[in-house]
Image (cartoon, rainbow, N blue to C red):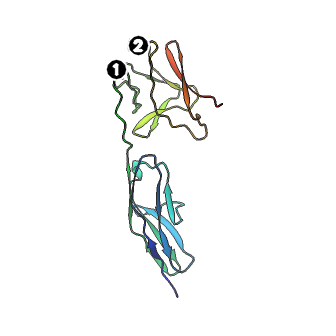
Amino acid sequence: MRLVPLITWQPVSESTLVGSTATFTVAAAGTPPLSYQWRFGGTNIAGATGTSLTLSNVQPAQSGICALQVANAYGSTLSANASLTVTPTPCTPPPSGLVSWWHGEGDSLDAIGTNIGTLQNRATFAAGRVGKGFNFDGINDYVRVPKAASLDTPNRLTIDFWIKANPSQPIGERAEGIAVRSHITILPATTA
């Protein structure tokens, strides 16, 4: 008996946060061999030729409609549409008592005070978990913040930051800060 492909399990729409992984799965039956091609917005996705589609590190531009076309020698069938909605990760509110806050949103301005930073060497900006962030290649680049009375807090200093390490150059499981006179250096911790 000749069977045109039949979708037996439709893909399910998914809503996820920026940087997360989204997976769509379809099951089909029909006369073998079956071939599969995932489509996004009606256009084939290169290399997406299995029953599942996994998208890693999703970004808002990937929000849209995807579907799977299943074909064999007797015809083809398109699955139902599944939507992918990618939303920004919600930020936690800044803590009270902040003296300075450098967002890294395409500039090194201080959002709270007047301690403006300057990018040094090859420091740039890149997409972050939410918006943009500072991008350091690990070779002597940094943001320089001039010495200021508002930053002179003897024996009391808290630095809070998010970091995304390059998988080929992991920073380790923790980072330690070393205070040296009028500047702070964040270095990868040595592993024990």
Q: Position of residue 167 (x, y in %)?
A: 58, 41
Q: Residue furthest bottom?
A: 1
Q: Position of residue 53 (x, y in %)?
A: 49, 60
Instruction: Name the residue at 52% across, 61% down.
Output: 48
Is residue 119 left or right of 112 when viewed as pictured?
A: right
The image shows residue 103, relative to residue 151, as above or below, that is: below
Q: Nearer the viewer, residue 136 or 20?
A: 20
Instruction: Name the residue at 37% across, 24% down.
Output: 110
Q: Which image quarter holds the C terminus? A: top right
Tell me, yes or no, whether the two marked residues, 1 and 2, touch with CB atoms within 8 Å: yes
Q: Callout 1: few (<14), some (14-19), or many (20+) C-alpha neighbours within 10 Å?
A: few
* Amino acid under disc 1: Gly
Instruction: Name the residue at 58% across, 34% down.
Output: 171
Q: Callout 2: few (<14), some (14-19), or many (20+) C-alpha neighbours within 10 Å?
A: few
Secondary element at tag 2: loop
Q: Which residue is mark 2?
A: 148
- Give residue 167's mark: none
Question: Which of disc 2 and disc 1 is earlier in sequence?
Answer: 1
Q: CA distance from mark 1 to mark 2?
A: 11 Å
Instruction: Name the residue at 46% across, 48% down.
Output: 20
Q: Residue furthest right?
A: 192
Q: Position of residue 102 (x, y in %)?
A: 40, 27
* Amino acid under disc 2: Ala
The image shows residue 44, relative to residue 56, as above or below, that is: below
Q: Nearer the viewer, residue 190 or 40?
A: 190
Number of numbered discs visible in the structure rendering = 2
Q: Position of residue 95 (x, y in %)?
A: 36, 28
Q: Which residue is mark 1?
A: 113
Secondary element at tag 1: loop
